[in-house]
Amino acid sequence: VFINAIDFVVRANCKFIPPVGKGALYLRPLLFGSAKGLGVKPSEEATFCIYSSPVGNYFKGNLKCISLQAVKGYARAARGGSGNIKAGGNYAPPFALQRKVRDRGYDEALFLDASEGEYIEEAGASNFFALLKDKKTLVTPSLENETILPGVTRASLIELAKAELGLTVVERPLSVHELRDNVDECFCCGTGASVTPVGRIGYLS
């Protein structure tokens, strides 16, 4: 059903696919409860659909380094919650902090863990990677706490970094303070953000 639906939507909207290098046709599968009735309970029926739209770069303008700000005391998700689930409700918690950091001149918020406010989790709704100063080790926050979305872009980059670049990929906690002392470069990634380099990171304790 999923593959057939994707094929149908792309064929029906092929005239909206941007030229190579100018954007992409973004596809967003969606599943929502659609049973009759109003109540706090699981829906007995669900509707599956796919949105389609031509898009440019996730961050406005051509590909460039973006700036992030981490703010202690703000968290996107907590252990025991649903932060690792691709659900609409996971996009709302970052909005307040995203607005504040953009007002301060940053492109996006860098979210830290809820328990200690020390370890990096996600950059907005994107996964985060850091290349250490040895230029051989690529670190990304671990999925173990179930607070980070395990995106396919993240998984693909891990596989490519190992197979094509010969890097050692380590999934472990990454302290925001380690960025200053042990990191050569970093980037964020996602279906929308693709691979976006990070040029500056601020920290507000």
Image (cartoon, rainbow, N blue to C red):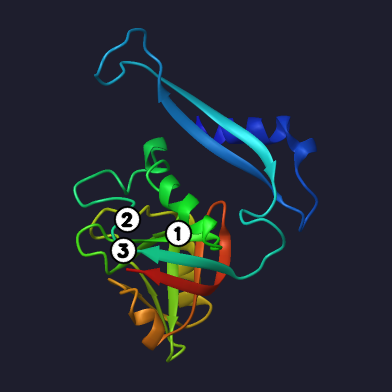
Sequence-earlier tag: 1 or 3:
3
Q: Is residue 180 above or below residue 146?
A: below
Neighbours of disc 1 within 10 Å: few (<14), some (14-19), many (20+): many
Image label count: 3
Q: Identify the mark at residue 74; answer none if there is no mark.
A: 2
Percent of width and height locating residue 91: 42, 43
Report the front residue among 145 and 27: 145
From mark 2 to mark 1, how far is it between C-alphas? 10 Å
Amino acid type of the residue that numbered disc 1 sits on in the rendered structure: Ala
Res 69 visible = yes
Q: Identify the mark at residue 109; answer none if there is no mark.
A: 1
Quarter of the rendering occupied by the C terminus: bottom left
From mark 1 to mark 3, how far is it between C-alphas? 11 Å
Amino acid type of the residue that numbered disc 2 sits on in the rendered structure: Tyr
**Quadrant of residue 162 within the rendered picture:** bottom left
From mark 3 to mark 2, how far is it between C-alphas? 6 Å
Neighbours of disc 2 within 10 Å: few (<14), some (14-19), many (20+): some
Percent of width and height locating residue 197: 57, 71
Residues marked 2 and 1 touching at CB (< 8 Å): yes
Q: Identify the mark at residue 90; answer none if there is no mark.
A: none
Task: Give left or right: position of 82 versus 190.
Answer: left
Sequence-earlier tag: 2 or 1:
2
Q: Is residue 25 above or below residue 37?
A: below
* Residue linked to disc 3: 72
Percent of width and height locating residue 174: 32, 73
Residues marked 3 and 2 touching at CB (< 8 Å): yes
